[in-house]
Amino acid sequence: MERASLPDGWRVWNEEPDGRVILVYRPDVFNSQDFPAVCLPTLYVTNGSPRRRPGSGAVETDQWHVKLFFEPEIEAESERYDSREDALAGAVGCAERFVDGDVAYRELYQVPRPDYFNELDRLLDIDDD
């Protein structure tokens, strides 16, 4: 995956040849000192079974999946694609929506985290007025 194709702040965390890709947002600040490490926004691109979390040794399928997580149990987006190339393009699109402020992460949490949300808004330069 071309690093230049990723929106600002997104990095390739792991890429398997012709396989799974993991993208993360700003690992430099999601380090337990500035932001909780568990809240690292993560995009998974995998052809593993959608019934199991990517990376858990799931059986490969013919479809590719893109999933955006804010925490291990906070899934923001999930899309299916017919090819790895389409899934990678879909992941870049999802990352772009995230940095543009078009992912409504506040609504995903059952227990509000206003201080975290405000800091994430600041990091993304989102005006929530």
Image (spheres, helix red, strand yellow):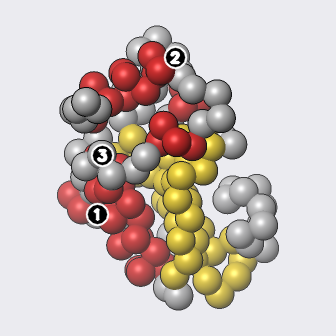
- Residue drawn at (34%, 63%), measured in percent from left and top? 92
Q: Which residue is mark 1?
A: 2
Helix, strand or loop at disc 2?
loop
Q: Amino acid at mark 2?
A: Ser
Mark 1 vs mark 3, foreground winner is 3
Image: 15 above or below 36 = below
Q: Which residue is mark 3?
A: 101
The image quarter in which residue 38 lies:
top right
| Residue 116 placement (x, y as % from top left) | 46, 21
Q: Which residue is mark 2?
A: 32
Q: Which mark is residue 107?
A: none
- Residue drawn at (78%, 67%), measured in percent from left and top? 51
Image: 86 above or below 33 = below
Tell me which label, 2 or 3, sits earlier in the chain: 2
Q: Quadrant of the C terminus?
A: top left
- Residue drawn at (50%, 46%), measured in percent from left and top? 42
- Residue drawn at (48%, 37%), measured in percent from left and top? 106
Q: Amino acid at mark 1?
A: Glu
Helix, strand or loop at disc 3?
loop
Horizontal relation, residue 80 to residue 25: left or right? right
User: Do callouts 2 and 3 mark residues in contact (Cβ within 8 Å)?
Assistant: no
Q: Amino acid at mark 3?
A: Gly
Mark 1 vs mark 2, foreground winner is 2
| Residue 57 placement (x, y as % from top left) | 78, 61
Helix, strand or loop at disc 1?
loop
Tell me which label, 1 or 2, sits earlier in the chain: 1
The image quarter in which residue 58 lies:
bottom right
Horizontal relation, residue 120 to residue 44: left or right? left
Image: 92 above or below 84 = above
Of residues 92 and 110, which is closer to you in this image? 110
